Amino acid sequence: MKKVFPDRQLELLPLTHEIFHTFFDIDSLIQVPGFGGGCYQGPTWQVSDETDPRVYGLSDDRGRLMVVATYNSDLGDAWEYMDAACYPEKYSGQAYRMGLNFMIYAMTH
């Protein structure tokens, strides 16, 4: 991102940020595992001393988010495998709520 926005920095977004309350109220982050972690109860993180899910954002001069990045949370796998019998619904549900909030925020700000 430094090449695209050299004067900006990704910052941790607090749960009070508007993006978490645009359509759905998201009051806590859960770690959404990839397919293996969801279906086979494997580890859901890459680095064992960094297991908490986080959401980072990069804002413009008016404070509007231009970039959102999730860390330790595989929203894409939750969307892709929502039909798999082995993948828990709670993860897909959370991933869709977050994704819809992200999209609605992007279209309205």
Image (tube, rainbow, N blue to C red):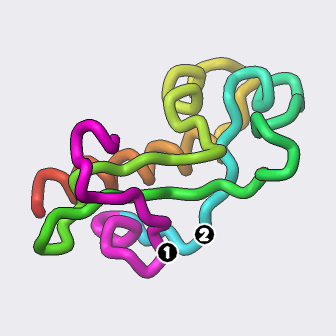
Extreme-bottom residue of the structure: 16
Is residue 6 rendered magenta in the image? yes
In this rendering, would 108 be left or right of 3? left
Q: Earlier in the sequence, mark 1 or mark 2?
A: 1
Residue drawn at (78%, 21%) of the image: 36
Quadrant where the image shows the N terminus: top left
Cβ–Cβ under 8 Å for marks 1 and 2: yes
Q: Which residues are magenta?
A: 1-23
Residue sitting nearer the eye, 8 or 97: 8
Residue 17 percent across, percent down from the top left: 37, 75
Residue 42 percent across, percent down from the top left: 88, 29
Up-down: is 29 above or below 41?
below
Please state which amino acid type lies under the numbered disc 1.
Answer: Leu
Of the two numbered discs 1 and 2 in the rendering, the one whose residue sits closer to the viewer: 1
Callout 2: 10 Å neighbours few (<14), some, many (20+)?
Answer: few
Callout 1: 10 Å neighbours few (<14), some, many (20+)?
Answer: some
- What residue is shown with label 2? 28
In this rendering, would 23 be left or right of 96? left
In this rendering, would 96 be left or right of 85? left
Residue drawn at (72%, 36%) of the image: 88
Residue drawn at (40%, 57%) of the image: 10
Determine the secondary structure under disc 1.
loop
| Distance between mark 1 and mark 2 Cα atoms | 7 Å
Residue 87 marker: none
Please state which amino acid type lies under the numbered disc 2.
Answer: Ser
The answer to which quarter of the image holds residue 84 is: top right
Residue sitting nearer the eye, 66 or 43: 66
- What residue is shown with label 1? 15
Residue drawn at (44%, 52%) of the image: 97
Look at the magenta stretch and give its main secondary structure. Answer: loop
Residue 26 percent across, percent down from the top left: 49, 68
Is residue 74 rendered magenta in the image? no
